[in-house]
Structure formats: structure tokens, C-alpha cells
């Protein structure tokens, strides 16, 4: 049976549309009366590949611009001249099953190089979040580091996630891990620390000053430059769920840190530089200063800039 194409896909160089990467242009009469009028994304079906080995494929693409007979969408990775057989408005309510998992996502992707894994993680998180911002890149970098440290898949069912207060990083980590409030494996303590917990181990990430930059800047930086990272044993309050209602008791050392943080404020805020200085003086990890600042409900001034707030 022959299906008549409704349009042809062409890849265009950047420049035709501001801020876009490679474009796909559909030359088609569709668009008027097809019902995708205000959809932000479309579902494309095409016959991709050489005659004989051509296969039907589908892709969801973001709509960048539309006029009669021409629709520009984000790149879908199909070759020039690919005949498009169908074009419909896309809704995650119809097709997006967020809880769906693949076998690959449950296991560590051994044999793939870091850059390829990171690129896929950023794409996936950006689709969930709606933009490709610095927070998305930071979340993807945390995810990749955790996967490599523990040799686990991104959607490993034993992962628990504790979120800090940056919404962009939080969205990335939720999207990539599939850990939602409904799974019972998500906590949102707020503050500056992002933490994965698995079994009796934890990995905590505290953003450094170098994390406060644009998406294109942070993408080239080492994860160790972007975060102070600590491998930790499970915290005592985690092991005793019956004590969860009571605020955790501070040790003498923690009390002293909170006091020193409160004594070091300028205009009611702690500077990043001061946080590192206090950590140095007390021979503690920067994460402990972050925790003390959170307990004292003190803002770190540099964190008012950029992605973190
Ligand atoms: Zn964002």
C-alpha cells in the first residue's frame, strides 16, 4: 500500500530563525485545518532511510514557526528530503507516559562515552523542563557523576533523591531519575544541597561559584569544578524514621558553625567566599557550611545570581 506524503523535510542551517539550531522545514499544505493550531509540539511520522531499508519512524518536535504550508520545527535528525507521512499536534496526555522505563535506563550504560550520555541526559531533561538552561546542564552533570560513581542506571529503582531549592536543577533530576513525590523516594528539604541516596550510601552536591554561569559555560566545566561533592554514609536521622518528626539535634560543632555563620553576615547574607573561609578555618567540608546556613535560614549572597536563588 502506498501512503502519499503530506510534506518533505529539509534541514536548514541556523540563521533562518533566531536562536535555533538546525531546523526542519516541512513544505506541506497541512497546518491549516489540521488541528495542531496552538500546539507547542508536533508528532511527525516519516519513512526514513534508503528505499528498501526505509522504516517508519515517529518523532516529537518543538514548533519554532509556522506559516501557510511551511512549518519550522526543532531538529529531529532525519536526512534531507525525508518524506513526511503524517503530522499531528502532540500532547503528553495522549502519548507521554512519564513512569515508563526501558531496560537500558535501569542499568549503567557501560560502553558509551561520557559526552554522548551527557548529551542525551541534557536533551531528556530539557524536554521535561521546557528550556535548555544552566540548571538543566547542572542536573545532567550530577546525574552522570552519580551513575558513574555507583555504576547504576539513571532510573535505578533503589535511588532516592533529596532536592535543593533551584527549580531548574530539581526538574532535571526528577525528569532523569523518574523519582517523583508519588514514588515515595523524593524529599524536598530545599537549601543548596542536592543528594542521591541508595541503600546506606549518599552522594551530596553543593554548587560552587563556578556553577553560577550560563548553560554554554557550565557544559564545558568538570563536575568537580561545579560542585563540592561528598560521598557519605546515610545520615543518622535517616536510619531512625520514628524520629523524623522531631528536628534533628545539633551537635556542639554544628551549633558553633551556625553561630559563626550568623556572626559573618554582611547585609544579612553570607558570601560564597566567606562560606569557604569558615569551612577552611574549621577544617570541615563546604557542605557542612551550606547545612549550617540552611539551618540558620541564611542566604548565600552570590547565590542570588544566575540559576540558583
Ligand atoms: Zn531552567
Image (cartoon, rainbow, N blue to C red):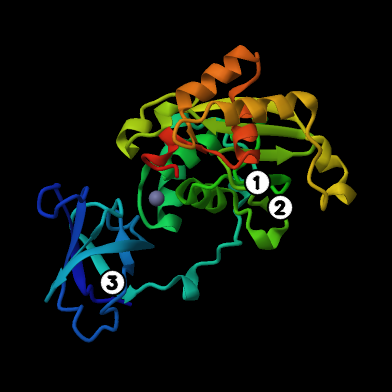
Label 1 or label 3, whichever lies nearer to me, is 1
- Which quadrant is home to the N terminus? bottom left
Query: Residue 293 falls in which quadrant of the image?
Result: top right
Q: Can you identify the residue that label 2 sits on?
A: 185
Tag 1 near tag 2, CB within 8 Å: yes
Q: Can you identify the residue that label 3 sits on?
A: 85
Judged from the image, the secondary structure of the residue bearing numbered disc 1 is strand
Q: Residue at x 25, y 79 (%)?
A: 37
Q: Residue at x 20, y 78 (%)?
A: 31
Query: Residue 153 falls in which quadrant of the image?
Result: top right
**Which is more N-terminal, label 2 or label 3?**
3
Real-space CA distance between mark 1 and mark 2, rounded to the nearest whole angstrom = 6 Å
Q: Can you identify the residue that label 1 sits on?
A: 161
Real-space CA distance between mark 3 and mark 2, rounded to the nearest whole angstrom = 42 Å
Q: Position of residue 72 (x, y in %)?
A: 19, 63
Real-space CA distance between mark 1 and mark 3, rounded to the nearest whole angstrom = 42 Å
Q: Position of residue 64 (x, y in %)?
A: 22, 62
Q: Position of residue 84 (x, y in %)?
A: 25, 67
Q: Nearer the viewer, residue 64 or 244?
A: 244
Q: Position of residue 166 (x, y in %)?
A: 49, 47
Q: Residue at x 58, y 43 (%)?
A: 191
Query: Residue 41 falls in which quadrant of the image?
Result: bottom left
Can you see residue 280?
Answer: yes
Can you see residue 225?
Answer: no
Number of marks in the rendered image: 3
Amino acid at each position: 500500500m502506498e501512503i502519499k506524503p503530506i510534506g518533505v523535510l529539509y534541514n536548514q542551517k541556523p540563521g533562518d530563525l533566531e536562536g535555533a539550531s538546525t531546523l526542519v522545514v516541512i513544505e506541506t499544505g497541512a497546518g491549516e485545518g489540521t488541528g495542531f493550531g496552538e500546539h507547542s509540539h508536533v508528532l511527525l511520522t516519516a519513512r526514513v532511510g534508503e528505499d528498501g531499508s526505509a522504516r517508519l519512524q515517529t518523532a516529537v518536535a518543538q514548533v519554532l514557526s509556522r506559516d501557510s504550508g511551511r512549518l519550522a520545527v526543532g531538529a529531529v535528525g532525519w536526512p534531507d528530503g525525508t518524506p513526511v507521512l503524517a503530522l499531528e499536534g502532540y500532547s503528553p496526555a495522549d502519548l507521554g507516559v512519564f513512569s515508563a522505563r526501558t531496560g537500558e535506563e535501569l542499568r549503567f550504560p557501560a560502553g558509551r562515552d561520557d559526552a554522548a550520555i551527557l548529551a542525551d541526559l541534557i536533551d531528556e531533561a530539557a524536554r521535561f523542563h521546557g528550556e535548555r538552561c544552566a540548571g538543566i546542564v547542572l542536573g545532567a552533570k550530577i546525574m552522570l557523576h552519580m551513575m558513574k560513581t555507583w555504576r547504576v542506571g539513571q532510573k535505578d529503582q533503589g535511588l532516592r533523591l533529596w532536592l535543593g531549592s533551584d527549580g531548574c536543577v530539581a526538574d532535571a533530576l526528577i525528569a532523569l531519575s523518574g523519582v517523583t513525590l508519588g514514588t515515595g523516594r523524593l524529599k524536598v528539604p530545599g537549601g543548596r544541597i542536592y543528594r542521591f541516596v541508595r541503600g546506606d550510601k549518599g552522594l551530596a552536591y553543593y554548587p560552587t561559584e563556578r556553577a553560577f554561569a550560563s548553560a554554554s559555560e557550565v557544559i564545558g566545566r568538570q563536575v568537580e569544578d561545579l560542585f563540592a561533592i561528598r560521598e557519605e554514609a546515610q545520615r543518622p536521622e535517616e536510619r531512625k524514621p520514628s524520629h523524623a518528626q522531631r528536628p534533628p539535634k545539633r551537635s556542639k560543632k554544628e551549633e558553633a558553625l551556625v553561630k559563626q555563620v550568623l556572626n559573618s553576615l554582611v547585609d544579612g547574607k553570607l558570601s560564597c567566599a566567606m562560606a569557604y573561609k569558615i569551612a577552611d578555618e574549621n577544617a570541615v567540608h563546604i557542605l557542612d557550611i551550606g547545612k549550617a546556613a540552611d539551618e540558620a535560614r541564611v542566604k548565600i549572597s552570590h547565590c542570588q545570581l544566575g540559576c540558583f536563588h
